[in-house]
Image (tube, helix red, strand yellow):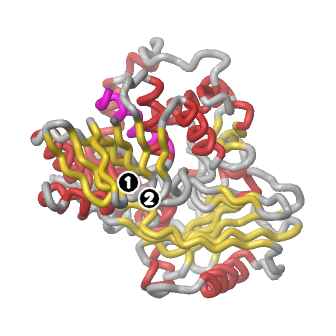
């Protein structure tokens, strides 16, 4: 038997890829909750409105992005895909809230040479700062510190800090540049600056500018080809993103995969035959285990037999995010944009707001999603705020920032506990150490999911695919 811990999108993907590769072993997915899909969760209101608690769009870029589009095709739900081109207003207009005002960030090369508030100089001037800054030899560094040194404090405060809030609800002063922006980090270490590293990389790859790339291009007729031709910035699914895990569940179950809901694993003991899993009051013998649960949840399962491994896993922290979905009748926005993020330095109780219906309209309604908490959950919202308190804070902020006086016709408050891992300084080396320990001790255990290789939907699906390959 092959065991998969976690029924989120990465756990379902691991089962899918094992099945696709023709695994002969029985596959069982153990999900501690009452539903699959993890943080991908779409709710439909009585009036037909859709609210997304978690991810709502996916980027089609790079190998992982193309892999997800291929998965969509294999699941036969391509007809539900809705792409947003890079020319769309929500792809071009991304805002930050600084000093009591919304500012649109530069979105083109030309705009980088023009000064735009809240920046005191054109963003292109940051490259001169980079060329003047000396190289600092480091094993890792926070992405805030790195950008502040090389590109200037304004870019760190007004671009990087809010971006990190949007990616992982985290503090840029704690998040690893080596993990999140590895190329930039290596350019400084190997070439002395970002600019020199960029030029050196371009020169090294100069032949690819004039010859056909060896990387296979998307085939005509595929979703990846369509995404490239139409220059998609992001895409989603008509009816909500939760259609993806729901469809995947039906597919793997039809292929014989067993999915155990409310199946919380409390202990894993490795032996010569594989692994013994304690799930509830039952024991299951597995040839190997793919864990897609958060590292901090996996840690206690291994504590008795492998305390050193457990300790390292427990050092990958998570944060809790409150999500408030709001719907208003008619158009109540004065901005046609993706939404806005707020730098931590503004000391606001919210991280940002997504203008959902600017990307995907829902009849004559305006739907917004307010993100709150993250790294600052307790300090700004309290240890256990009520749903009413969270709602009132969200409404107060959007009334102040967006000048919306109308009462929402629908709302939903969700507290997503420990939902996003924090890739703190040293994360890259920690993950290497964890996987090195597993390999050294020849444990029948593979790791996938957002704790290790990236927080995006593409990242966790691709990491599950890699884990499945190891276990064939």
| The magenta segment | 456-472
Residue 409 in which image quadrant:
bottom right
Closer mark to the observer between disc 1 and disc 2? 2
Q: Which residue is mark 1?
A: 293
Identify the residue at horizontal 83%, vertical 79% (top origin).
Answer: 406
Q: Which mark is residue 219?
A: none
Q: Are marks 1 and 2 in contact (CB under 8 Å)?
A: yes
- Residue 456 visible within the image: no
258 lies left or right of 176: right
**Mark 1 surroundings: few (<14), some (14-19) or many (≥20) residues within 10 A:** many
The residues tagged by marks 1 and 2 sit, at their Cα atoms, a distance apart of: 10 Å
- Residue 375 visible within the image: yes
Q: Which sits in the foreground, 41 or 286?
A: 286
Residue 14 horizontal/vertical position (percent): 42, 37
70 lies left or right of 145: right
Q: Which sits in the foreground, 263 or 294?
A: 263
Q: Earlier in the sequence, mark 1 or mark 2?
A: 2
Q: Which residue is mark 2?
A: 32
Q: Is residue 393 magenta?
A: no
Q: Secondary structure at mark 2?
A: loop
Residue 293 in which image quadrant:
bottom left
Q: Which sits in the foreground, 224 or 202?
A: 224
- Give the position of the C terminus as an image quadrant: top left
Relative vertical location of residue 411 with respect to residue 10 in this rendering, above or below: below
Residue 294 in which image quadrant:
bottom left
Identify the residue at horizontal 15%, vertical 61% (top origin).
Answer: 304
Identify the residue at horizontal 37%, vertical 66% (top origin).
Answer: 318
Taken as a whole, is the magenta stretch helix, strand or loop? helix
Identify the residue at horizontal 73%, vertical 81% (top origin).
Answer: 399
Relative vertical location of residue 68 with respect to residue 429 in this rendering, above or below: above
């Amino acid at each position: 038997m092959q065991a998969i811990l976690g029924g989120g999108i990465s756990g379902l993907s691991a089962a899918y890829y094992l099945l696709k590769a023709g695994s002969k072993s029985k596959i069982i997915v153990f999900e501690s909750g009452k539903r699959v899909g993890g943080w991908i969760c779409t709710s439909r209101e009585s009036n037909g409105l859709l609210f997304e608690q978690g991810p709502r769009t996916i980027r089609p870029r790079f190998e992982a992005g193309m892999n997800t589009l291929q998965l969509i095709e294999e699941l036969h739900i391509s007809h539900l895909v809705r792409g947003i081109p890079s020319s769309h207003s929500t792809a071009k207009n991304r805002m930050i809230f600084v000093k009591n005002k919304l500012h649109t960030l530069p979105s083109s090369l030309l705009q980088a040479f023009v000064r735009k508030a809240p920046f005191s100089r054109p963003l292109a001037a940051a490259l001169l700062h980079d060329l003047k800054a000396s190289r600092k030899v480091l094993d890792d560094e926070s992405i805030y510190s790195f950008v502040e040194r090389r590109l200037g404090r304004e870019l760190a405060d007004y671009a990087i800090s809010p971006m990190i809030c949007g990616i992982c609800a985290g503090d840029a002063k704690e998040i690893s540049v080596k993990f999140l922006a590895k190329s930039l980090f290596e350019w400084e270490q190997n070439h002395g600056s970002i600019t020199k590293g960029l030029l050196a990389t371009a020169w090294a790859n100069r032949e690819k500018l004039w010859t056909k790339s060896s990387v296979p291009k998307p085939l005509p007729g595929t979703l990846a080809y369509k995404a490239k031709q139409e220059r998609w910035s992001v895409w989603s699914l008509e009816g909500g993103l939760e259609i993806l895990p729901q469809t995947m569940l039906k597919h793997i179950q039809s292929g014989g995969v067993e999915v155990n809901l409310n199946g919380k694993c409390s202990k894993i003991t490795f032996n010569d035959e594989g692994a013994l899993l304690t799930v509830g009051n039952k024991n299951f013998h597995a040839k190997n285990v793919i864990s897609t649960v958060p590292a901090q949840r996996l840690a206690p399962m291994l504590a008795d037999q492998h305390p050193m491994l457990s300790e390292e896993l427990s050092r990958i922290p998570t944060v809790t995010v409150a999500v408030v979905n709001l719907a208003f009748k008619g158009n109540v926005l004065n901005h046609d944009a993706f939404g806005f993020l707020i730098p931590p330095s503004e000391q606001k109780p919210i991280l940002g707001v997504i203008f959902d219906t600017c990307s995907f309209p829902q009849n004559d309604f305006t739907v917004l999603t307010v993100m709150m908490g993250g790294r600052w959950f307790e300090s700004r919202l309290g240890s256990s705020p009520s749903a009413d308190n969270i709602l009132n804070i969200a409404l107060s902020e959007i009334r102040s920032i967006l000048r919306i006086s109308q009462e929402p016709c629908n709302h939903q408050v969700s507290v997503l506990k420990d939902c996003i891992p924090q890739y703190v300084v040293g994360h890259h080396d920690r993950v290497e150490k964890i996987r090195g320990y597993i390999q050294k001790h020849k444990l029948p255990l593979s790791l996938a999911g957002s704790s290790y290789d990236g927080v995006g939907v593409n990242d966790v699906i691709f990491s599950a695919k890699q884990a499945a390959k190891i276990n064939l």
